[in-house]
Image (cartoon, grey):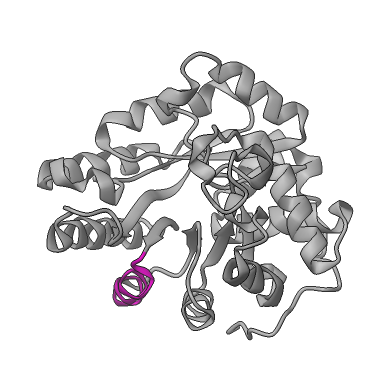
Amino acid sequence: MWIDTHCHLDAGEFDADRDAVAAAAAAAGVTGIVLPAVAVSNFAAVRALAQRHDSCVYALGIHPLCTPGAAQSDLDVLRREVQASLADPRFVGIGEIGLDFFVPGLDAAHQTWIYTEQLKIAREFDLPVLLHVRKSQDQVAAQLRRAGVRQGIAHAFNGSVQQARGFVDQGLKLGFGGNLTFSRAKQIRRLALELPLDAIVLETDAPDIAPAWLSDDQFGEQHKARNTPAEVVGVARVLGELRGLDAAALAPAMWQNSVAALPRLAAFAATMFPSALPASASAPAETTGNLPVSS
């Protein structure tokens, strides 16, 4: 039983076969899929998808790439929608939010304002966050500390050991996906090996960041192929190979880590997939690497 903690199943790339993609993931053993929103305009879409597919849950937020058109009115809508969603067991947090200093042309000050205001909403409602941290790890972490948000996931993490430690010490998990599957991704693989296992969650970011076996270019041009949530099983296999763990040990640990990052998943998992998260399950013996985790 696997969980994909970051998948954009509402994306246009899935318009022709969305239900079949979700069914294929379920057939592959993916019993949980987290669908983060990216703008007010797709809040309804991710909620509807989560209601339509047994394996899906959702988060609400404004992605940094969508901040150019975002204003106070969007933040007001977000706050109202979050408050209204608290009674929905499929609602798990605030996301996808964060900062992107890779894409040219984005207003750094404006996206930082949108991000920090969303952190305030997360803190107000005691919710975890799904973070976008592309070329912005230090700035995202600094605002996270100021806001006092201590749960969530730094998605598609690709920072340094020191930056990883900062997020883990803040209480977050780090998301690893298709990038991990490329042999040239030395830094990402080093982190996946050396981090404590309880600091890691799995993801796909589908339809983006396709794994090596779907790519036309084994040297890292992953975006040529469409990724799907079923591929999280292959990502798990690579992580297991790196760490010397088999699926029987890794699967329950990844579910437990995901629930620790997104606590509202616990009720969902217990209701929908009780076998995915055994009540008495314990992490495998190999749970720590070389990076200490604050208690």
Tell which of 176 and 103 is nearer to you: 103
Residue depicted at x 45% and y 70%: 150
- Left or right: where does residue 152 sit relative to residue 181? left
Q: Does the magenta stretch include residue 157?
A: no
- Left or right: where does residue 161 sit relative to residue 65? right
Q: Position of residue 202 (x, y in %)?
A: 63, 53
- In the picture, which quadrant includes the N terminus? top right
Q: Is residue 141 magenta?
A: yes
**Can you name the residue that lies furthest to the top here?**
16
Residue 214, compared with residue 155, is above or below; it is: above
Tell which of 162 and 226 is nearer to you: 226
Q: Position of residue 129 (x, y in %)?
A: 42, 57
Residue depicted at x 28% and y 38%: 39
Tell which of 186 and 253 is nearer to you: 186
Q: Position of residue 248 (x, y in %)?
A: 88, 53
Find the magenta span and give its range. Answer: 135-146
Instruction: Determine if residue 97 is in view.
Output: yes
- Quadrant for residue 194, please give it: bottom right
- Quadrant for residue 124, please give it: bottom left
Residue depicted at x 26% and y 42%: 78
Residue 90, compared with residue 194, is above or below; it is: above
Instruction: Determine if residue 208 is in view.
Output: no
- Quadrant for residue 32, please give it: top right
- In the picture, which quadrant includes the C terminus? bottom right
Residue depicted at x 78% and y 51%: 237
Q: Is the magenta stretch mostly helix, strand or loop?
A: helix
Q: Where is residue 210 in the image (x, y as percent from the top left)?
A: 57, 42
